[in-house]
Amino acid sequence: MKHSLAVALLVFAMCGSAAVWKLTCEAAPALRTKEVPLLDIVHHRADAYQQFPESFPLQIAVFWTSPGSDPENPLPLVHSLKEMGIPFFITRDLPQALRHRLVILYPSVDWRTFTQPQADQLTTFVRQGGFVFAQNVFWGGLQNLFGFRSFAPSRKRYRLAFSATKDPVTKYLNHPEERQTQLGSDRFPEIIWSNGYVPDPGAEVLAHFDDGSAALLTNSVGKGKVYLLGLSLLDVVLRNQNNRDYEAQRHYVNAFEPGADVWLLVLRAWYEAYGKDWVRLATIPGGQRSALLLSHDVDWENSFAPGLDFARVEKANQASSTFFIQTKYVDDANSKAFFFAPNVDILQQLKGRGSTVGSHSIIHSRGFNKFELGTGHETYSSYQPRGLGFDTASGATVFGEVRVSKELLDGQIPGQDTTFFRAGHLRVPASLPEALERSGYQFDSSFTADDVLSNFPFALPRALGFEEDSEIYEFPVTIEDEESPGFAKRVPQALGVILANAENGAVSVVLIHSNESVVKAAAEQELLRQLPPDIVKTDMLTFAKFWRSRDRLQWSLTGTSVPTEVVLQVKSAESVAGLTFEFQRPIATVTGGATMSPDKRHLVLPEVAPGLSVSIHINYLR
Ligand SMILES: [Zn+2]
């Protein structure tokens, strides 16, 4: 109270009289801004072979079957393998691919893909102990190898169920939500394409569609084995991630929905079952099992002060969080302006006490997903958006909401560089990735994990399309506080979801609105107290920076003249701490300041400095 009185007196003194204050200060509140330069979009023009070159034997060879004039690009597979930390390269050279033990044929195989001699080479490769994972093989010339008699394309298969089998690729699928998935809502007369296979008697069906046809089958040939999927990762991974799916999700928020993750986990299990002395870049830092990413949305005039209570509870429980701030500086149909002192002072306190801050737009419109992109020249002095009704607005653009909120947060909070965005009402326009990356953002959290059917962060494709990634990484919301009967009554349910994600090495993002801190902060404390110690409790920005560095990490593992010794080489463009590698073989000793977990199968790297190549020598136990 004392503080706000002092501010009022100061304002009064500055403006001279109440009358003048009304005229000048109310029309243009004295908010500091920091310029947000408009950046160009950087296209990574290098082709897939240059971007993902062959560099060590352990890599999976991805044989890209569709490099023609209208190619289906490998982006869905790149997402899947990178998120799982599986090393790979992309090639069009079949003999080069077949020098590696594990080969993926992507995106499909038809009569034009291989010559008969090449098909024979592939068969010989498997017979001699090679492993192939393919999707949508249509060619009769490879029917025997892949173990099918016929197939039937359809857009009317809505569900998929994994069979009870001992096959190692289904190792990670233990929850009912993983054993059965939905490919699209039956509200649509047609959904994604699928190919239902009729298997050979010798092949084993690992998953089937709702019409009984085989969705995933495996066939042992000689010393090797092949796997065939009657779906495309474009449809069951990337289409979900960019929210272009046919409403395949079974829930919107607060539930465990791994519909896309199952395919990432199948690929991981395939790599771990057949890779020789495999090594994987783990998803979580510090050798931990999972991460709980905490966030608060501040989108009401009375939501600022309770934020301090949440920050206190988090600090007392060795956690921290990211506050997404609505920088509301205009009055409109939805609310009065509230982005001014003393609310802004609270942000400075939050930041000073270790919380991080992101943008939650300006007018928080339910119509944000329908906004025009704008020019990119919107600034605080000229941008005057107003919400008009339930989901309508005037003078508002995607660029305006993104850029001007950053101008204000960066200008008002010392040391702030806003790189995280969350849309009001979680409405996402297709132009959001462009507006964000051109305004200097790096991270977004505007989707729900259930809606995108994935609990791993991912690179957000430009225009939410299928062609290329933007510079933005997406961290979808897993748990929120508003759904009935309210977060405080749903803590056990939230823990269930968090633990299911932890089993997969996935993360969970929690969103709690800070409009009230008595009931909700106590509930958050309860959640934090019940969390197993191997789940990291962190703010979103800290984890997001880790994930970005991890996703862009260059690494290799090469042998030495000593049979039990290998060298792990890593290079990161950004400083990153806690990088963790998982090994199939137990480790005896390690150099370079890396620390070994008690199970001797996880290595945690010391902080890696930007641009430096670090070599770590590893001796296996036997
Ligand atoms: Zn909000």
Image (tube, rainbow, N blue to C red):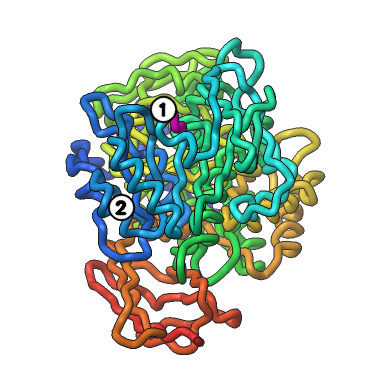
Q: Label 2: few (<14), some or many (≥20) within 10 Å?
A: many
Which residue is more in the foreground, 348 or 591? Answer: 591
Can residue 351 be seen here? The reply is: yes
Residue 581, position as x, y percentages in the image: 46, 70
First along the sequence among labels 2 and 1: 1
Which residue is more in the foreground, 308 or 546? Answer: 546
Amino acid type indicated by mark 1: Lys
In the image, residue 79 sits, relative to residue 293, either above or below, namely above
Which residue is more in the foreground, 317 or 369? Answer: 369
Residue 41, position as x, y percentages in the image: 22, 36
Q: Quadrant of residue 568?
A: bottom left
Residue 238, position as x, y percentages in the image: 45, 35
In the image, residue 56 sits, relative to residue 10, either above or below, namely below
Figure quarter occupied by ligand 1: top right
Q: Please give the name of the residue rendered at 54% of the width and 43% of the height, measured from the top-left corner.
A: 263
Magenta run includes residue 126: no
Can residue 323 be seen here? The reply is: no
Q: Quadrant of residue 64?
A: top left
What secondary structure characterizes most of the magenta part? Answer: loop
Q: Label 1: few (<14), some or many (≥20) within 10 Å?
A: few
Q: Please give the name of the residue rendered at 57% of the width and 68% of the height, measured from the top-left corner.
A: 288
Q: In the rendered image, which residue does mark 2 sit on?
A: 97
Which residue is more in the foreground, 359 or 153? Answer: 153
- Tell whether 96 sits left or right of 577: left
Q: Describe the element under mark 1 as helix, strand or loop.
A: helix
- Tell whether 459 sits left or right of 319: left
Q: Describe the element under mark 2 as helix, strand or loop.
A: helix
Q: Where residue 22 is drawn, which disc sits there?
A: 1
In the image, residue 56 sits, relative to residue 18, either above or below, namely below
In magenta, the rendered stretch is 136-140
